[in-house]
Image (spheres, grey):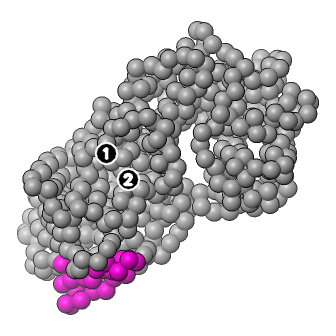
């Protein structure tokens, strides 16, 4: 949120809830939308059918709200936010038919009757802006054939909400939510016929937010694939709205879209979904494809993102993505996964992180932990200290990265100091992917720094396995056999350490809990030197040539 304290927020909220503020944003609405925006994002007809029955898909779960969702009690904040954003209108639109159109009108009209004055959640800038963008983009579906009284009520509400949003931008949220707010303000402004200096002022604000939030390599400063996709979609929508108003896009906007496209492609695994870092789930492949098509950019996936802090290793049909960045508290998406990696072969995920559960806050802290990532963990201690509110304490202050490529093989070495203060050691990880993509070798090294930390008692490397991967430990813990759903076989070997098979969880698919397994490579007996230094080597190799 913005940088002022709680007192400023409380004063603003008291003002927003006052009759004087309601009077200030009141006024006649337009007779019609001046510019008819179209919603290019595809919906899901099956989800539209569920909405007809009073069930809304929320982060992979179905929330039953009854005939009037605006008076349903007991909704989680996440579910309520999804309802108030109205992005599900496209599901009803793609379902089509009179029943879907009437349902959309009932839901929009019911919202206006219940929430047309300020509410802390419903009128939060990013939520309000998403609703404005959804209403103006689908107005042709639910509003064109409606009676005059309904159309007047919707257009008047659009105007009131837009006036509030314009006044709240200066003190509104930061980060992704700020760009969402500006996207909605621009879309509604264009649809309502605003132009000239007022629209230009919004464009200037968006350019400033882009310069502030998008790093030189094209990554969003939150370092989250989820944030990357959300912000890129907002920029593409904003450009489309400007084009609809017969205005040119800006150089900053076009440049950011191109650079962000390369990073989004980098953060996809072989199945087309997103890598699971910093609050991300896999996403929906066809939605990602649709977004990339709308960028109109031919920028390819980059191999190294030094500012955002990711490396991508590609050989044969194998793709690995590794987190090599300094953690950031941006957007509350912080996970303690430094030097974690994910691996896919063909369209199958093999090594994963545990993901995120945006609709189930009970799992939030557990999924942020280093142990929920495929990396090395010392004494079950997070490499980045995260408090219960998502704030950051002790954390890596620098991550050194080197990369080599030769004859189709890729080698990445990265080192972080997140354990220097707590345990007096640094962690260095080397990943080598052979040219054919069927041989991945790793080396994890703890090096004593001379600091005051406690000597590590236990160091383990965790390899979380995708739910569709079967595993068994063989050779008295010296190796493990992995088999994917397609039948491809892999063998994980360790140099002296003991492998154990344990339970794990996976929230990658829409944030829904799935049970899975993890391989834990424990510290080899006698391998830890007096000062706590340690070297563990491991290798993951393909056992057959069957399709994977």
Element under disc 2: loop
Left or right: residue 296 versus residue 239 is: left
Residue at 39%, 30% in the rendered image: 256
- Can I make out residue 292 in this image? yes
**What span is in magenta?**
469-493
Which numbered circle lies on residue 301?
Answer: 1
Q: Is residue 12 above or below residue 453?
A: above
Mark 1–mark 2 distance (CA, rounded to whole Å): 9 Å
Residue at 21%, 51% in the rendered image: 416
Left or right: residue 428 versus residue 55 is: left
Sequence-wise, which precedes: disc 1 or disc 2?
A: 2
Magenta: main secondary structure: strand
Residue 22 horizontal/vertical position (percent): 80, 23
Residue at 38%, 39% in the rendered image: 261
Which numbered circle lies on residue 208?
Answer: none
Residue 302 horizontal/vertical position (percent): 27, 43
Q: Nearer the viewer, residue 357 or 67?
A: 67
Residue 15 horizontal/vertical position (percent): 72, 24
Q: Are marks 1 and 2 in contact (CB under 8 Å)?
A: yes
- Residue 93 highlighted magenta (yes or no): no
The residue singled out by tag 2 in the image is 268
Residue at 37%, 33% in the rendered image: 258
The image quadrant of residue 498 is bottom left
Which quadrant is home to the C terminus?
bottom left
User: Would you call the spot at circle 1 few (<14 residues within 10 Å), some (14-19), or many (20 or more)?
Assistant: some
- Can I make out residue 219 in this image? no
Residue 130 horizontal/vertical position (percent): 63, 37
Left or right: residue 390 versus residue 421 is: right
- Residue 480 highlighted magenta (yes or no): yes
């Amino acid at each position: 949120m913005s940088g002022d304290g709680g007192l400023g927020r409380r004063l603003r909220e008291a003002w927003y809830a006052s009759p004087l503020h309601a009077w200030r944003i009141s006024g006649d609405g337009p007779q019609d939308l001046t510019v008819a925006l179209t919603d290019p994002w595809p919906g899901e007809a099956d989800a539209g059918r569920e909405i007809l029955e009073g069930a809304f898909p929320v982060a992979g779960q179905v929330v039953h709200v009854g005939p009037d969702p605006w008076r349903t009690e007991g909704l989680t904040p996440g579910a309520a936010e999804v309802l108030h954003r109205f992005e599900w209108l496209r599901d009803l639109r793609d379902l089509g038919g009179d029943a879907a159109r009437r349902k959309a009108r009932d839901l929009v009209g019911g919202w206006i009757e219940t929430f047309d004055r300020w509410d802390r959640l419903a009128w939060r800038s990013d939520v309000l802006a998403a609703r404005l963008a959804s209403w103006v983009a689908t107005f042709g579906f639910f509003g064109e054939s409606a009676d005059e009284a309904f159309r007047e009520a919707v257009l008047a509400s659009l105007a009131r909400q837009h006036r509030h949003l314009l006044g709240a931008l200066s003190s509104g949220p930061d980060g992704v939510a700020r760009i969402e707010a500006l996207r909605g303000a621009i879309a509604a402004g264009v649809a309502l016929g605003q132009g000239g200096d007022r629209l230009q002022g919004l464009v200037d604000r968006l350019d400033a937010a882009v310069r502030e939030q998008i790093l030189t390599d094209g990554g969003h400063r939150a370092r989250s694939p989820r944030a990357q996709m959300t912000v890129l979609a907002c920029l593409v929508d904003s450009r489309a709205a400007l084009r609809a108003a017969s205005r040119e896009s800006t150089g900053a906007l076009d440049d950011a879209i191109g650079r962000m496209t390369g990073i989004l492609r980098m953060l996809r695994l072989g199945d087309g979904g997103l890598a699971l870092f910093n609050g991300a789930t896999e996403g929906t492949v066809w939605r990602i494809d649709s977004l990339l098509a709308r960028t109109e950019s031919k920028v390819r996936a980059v191999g190294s993102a030094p500012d955002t802090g990711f490396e991508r290793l590609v050989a044969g049909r194998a793709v690995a993505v590794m987190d090599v960045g300094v953690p950031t508290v941006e957007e509350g998406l912080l996970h303690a996964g430094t030097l974690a990696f994910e691996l896919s072969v063909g369209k199958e995920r093999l090594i994963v992180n545990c993901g995120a559960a945006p609709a189930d806050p009970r799992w939030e802290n557990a999924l942020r932990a280093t142990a929920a990532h495929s990396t090395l963990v010392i004494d079950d201690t997070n490499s980045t200290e995260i408090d219960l509110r998502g704030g950051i304490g002790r954390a890596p202050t620098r991550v050194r990265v080197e990369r080599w490529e030769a004859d189709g093989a890729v080698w990445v070495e990265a080192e972080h100091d997140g354990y220097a203060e707590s345990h007096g050691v640094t962690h260095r990880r080397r990943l080598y992917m052979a040219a054919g993509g069927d041989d991945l070798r790793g080396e994890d090294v703890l090096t004593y720094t001379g600091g005051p930390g406690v000597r590590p008692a236990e160091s383990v490397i965790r390899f979380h396995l995708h739910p569709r991967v079967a595993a068994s430990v063989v050779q008295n813990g010296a190796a493990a056999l992995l088999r994917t759903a397609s039948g491809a076989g892999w063998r994980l070997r360790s140099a002296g350490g003991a492998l154990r098979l344990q339970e794990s969880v996976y929230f990658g698919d829409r944030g829904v809990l799935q049970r899975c397994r993890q391989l834990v490579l424990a510290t080899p007996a006698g391998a830890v030197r007096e000062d706590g230094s340690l070297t563990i080597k491991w290798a993951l190799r393909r056992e057959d040539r069957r399709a994977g």
